[in-house]
Image: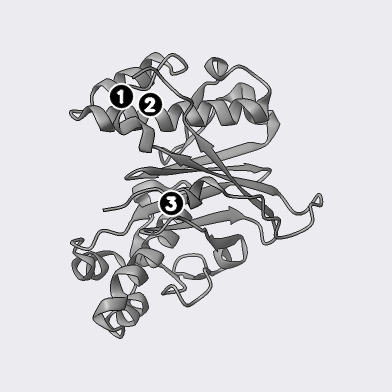
Amino acid sequence: MCTSSAAFKQVHPAPIHPQTASNPEVDVWLISCERSKKVHFSAELLSPEERERADRFHREPDGNQFRVTHTAMRMILAQYLKVDPQELSFSAEMGGKPELASEFRSTGIHFNLSHSSELALLAVARGARVGVDVECLTPEFPIEEVAERFFSPAEISALKALPGDERLEAFFSCWTRKEAYIKAVGGGFSIPLDGFEVAFGSERAAALVAVRDDPAEVSRWRMYDLETPKGYKAALVVEGRTHRLSQFSWSAPAQRE
């Protein structure tokens, strides 16, 4: 079972490149959902559609986690756009990827949200498309079956070559890298997971290795592994090759019990 930790709440900005006009700024926000297990989180900042989605969850903690992550997303994005959180509106690209509505497009702000268990990540980029994915390491997850169905032949071979006790972590490293790429591109289910290859395993630096239908894609994107609490894996994909990357944390404000 994944849990968040005190260490997660102490994330400091970590610039990777000096900021220049050609180095887009990328901020990754780590959002703790732990509080939502015991507090009914307010939905006052959410849109009617978001409130309805939260209410549709069968388990109250799941609905509360949705409220936490989407409230955090609104509060964080509002800081960049200098508007009230309630004023934000969103639309979807052709592949279903959420984006800021047309009235905010001139800001050049792109974002992507991912959630797993008690942790969520929000990536915010200026002037570049972005995708992020976080996953809880679940020991009972059928990694071999999923890999056979969705991984490239090279990724499957690399997984099978590992000792059994190393496969879980390596699988989720690969999975988050692949999901982050699909989310950055915005193609949704139209992009087959076995149609591209990423660097495999926790010991290899994150990278997009090959794209079957468009080899030039490799030079268009940069992939990063992200630091997470124990029990999670996460990856980030950003348009372009050099970026100024920083990480911050966000915790839900206190609510009435």
Q: Position of residue 127 (x, y in %)?
A: 68, 43
Q: Residue at x 26, y 31 (%)?
A: 61
3 or 2: tag closer to the N-terminus: 2
Disc number lying in front (3 or 2): 2
Q: Residue at x 51, y 58 (%)?
A: 227
2 or 1: tag closer to the N-terminus: 1
* Residue tagged 3: 133
Along the line of sight, which residue is nearer the eye, 71 or 40?
A: 40
Q: Which mark is residue 67?
A: 2
| Quarter of the view holding residue 218 | bottom right
Along the line of sight, which residue is nearer the eye, 165 or 256?
A: 256
| Quarter of the view holding residue 52 | top left
Q: Is residue 185 among the parts visible in the rendering? A: no
* Residue tagged 1: 54
**Alpha carbon distance from label 3 to label 2:** 19 Å
Q: Which mark is residue 151?
A: none
Question: Which element is circle 2 on?
Answer: helix
Say how many tags the image has: 3
Q: Check whether the beta carbons of the residues at disc 1 and disc 3 lie within 8 A of each other.
A: no
Q: Is residue 156 above or below residue 126?
A: below
Question: Which element is circle 1 on?
Answer: helix
Q: Position of residue 93 (x, y in %)?
A: 47, 36
* Crowd rating for badge 3 (residues with CA inside 10 Å; few <14, some 14–19, many 20+): many
Q: Check whether the beta carbons of the residues at disc 2 and disc 1 lie within 8 A of each other.
A: yes
Q: Amino acid at mark 1?
A: Ala
**Alpha carbon distance from label 2 to label 1:** 6 Å
Q: Residue at x 36, y 62 (%)?
A: 175
Q: Amino acid at mark 3?
A: Asp
